[in-house]
Image (cartoon, rainbow, N blue to C red):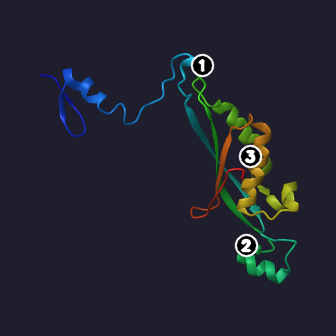
């Protein structure tokens, strides 16, 4: 007798379809086939592209005194600045196209990330080389907001879901446009 091994029990091969059907209602998988008038919801997917860049900055607010800046930002207020190897995760969310099978072409997402993140931010002094940070403190929170604001200009409408920045292994910022 042919036996199909499952995680918890042995099932004869001729009974395997019945065995599997016991679980089909527990976690239904949306079908990608059928007409658009079938009433079935179109599946939604998330794509995340990870990119790293290096930049330096100084945490310093023009709205605070020198002493207050030192108290608030500590060693990150060093007049000579400091650097990070940032890891950025850009996540898009959308309906999975029935023809291409994609939420978005990854080549297009990679190009957007190159234009918005790599070219203007990589190996730059954020405070001096990026106009946005001349009037905004270059915290990682504000870097995430800046990247979001620039990405929504180049991505299709309502596709950007999240910007996640790893400033260090222990410090991570998430921004979702709120």
Where disc 3 sits, the SS reads helix
Q: Say which residue label 2 marks.
A: 76
Numbered mark located on residue 27 in the image: none
Vertical position of residue 135 compared to residue 70: above or below = above
User: What residue did someone put label 1 on?
Assistant: 99
> 10 Å neighbourhood of mark 3: few (<14), some, or many (≥20)?
some
Q: Secondary structure at mark 1?
A: loop
Which of the two discs, 1 and 3, sits closer to the camera? 1
User: Nearer the N terminus, badge 2 or badge 3?
Assistant: 2
In the image: residue 121, left or right of residue 49: right
Displayed quadrant of residue 134:
bottom right
For image coordinates 81% across by 71% down, the residue present is 60
Residue drawn 61% across the image and 25% down it: 97
Residue 118: assigned label: 3
- Dot 1 or dot 3, earlier in sequence: 1
Point out residue 81 in the picture as x, y percentages from the top left corner. Answer: 77, 69
Eyeballing the image, is 50 above or below 12?
A: below
Which percent across, then down, holds residue 87? Answer: 63, 53
* Quadrant of the frame with the N terminus: top left
């Amino acid at each position: 007798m042919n036996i199909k091994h499952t995680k918890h029990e042995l099932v004869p091969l001729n009974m395997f379809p019945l065995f599997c059907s016991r679980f089909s209602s527990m976690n239904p998988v949306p079908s990608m086939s059928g007409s658009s008038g079938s009433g079935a919801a179109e599946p939604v997917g998330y794509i995340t592209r990870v990119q790293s860049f290096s930049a330096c900055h100084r945490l310093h607010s023009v709205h605070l005194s020198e002493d207050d800046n030192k108290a608030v930002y500590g060693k990150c207020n060093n007049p000579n600045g400091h650097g990070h190897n940032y890891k950025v995760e850009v996540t898009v969310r959308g309906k999975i196209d029935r023809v291409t099978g994609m939420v978005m072409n990854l080549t297009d997402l990679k190009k957007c990330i190159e234009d918005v993140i790599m070219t203007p931010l990589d190996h730059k002094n954020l405070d001096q080389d990026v106009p946005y940070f001349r009037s905004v403190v270059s915290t990682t929170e504000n870097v995430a907001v800046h990247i979001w604001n620039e990405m929504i200009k180049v991505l299709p409408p309502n596709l950007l879901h999240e910007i996640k920045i790893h400033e260090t292994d222990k410090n991570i910022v998430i921004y979702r446009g709120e």
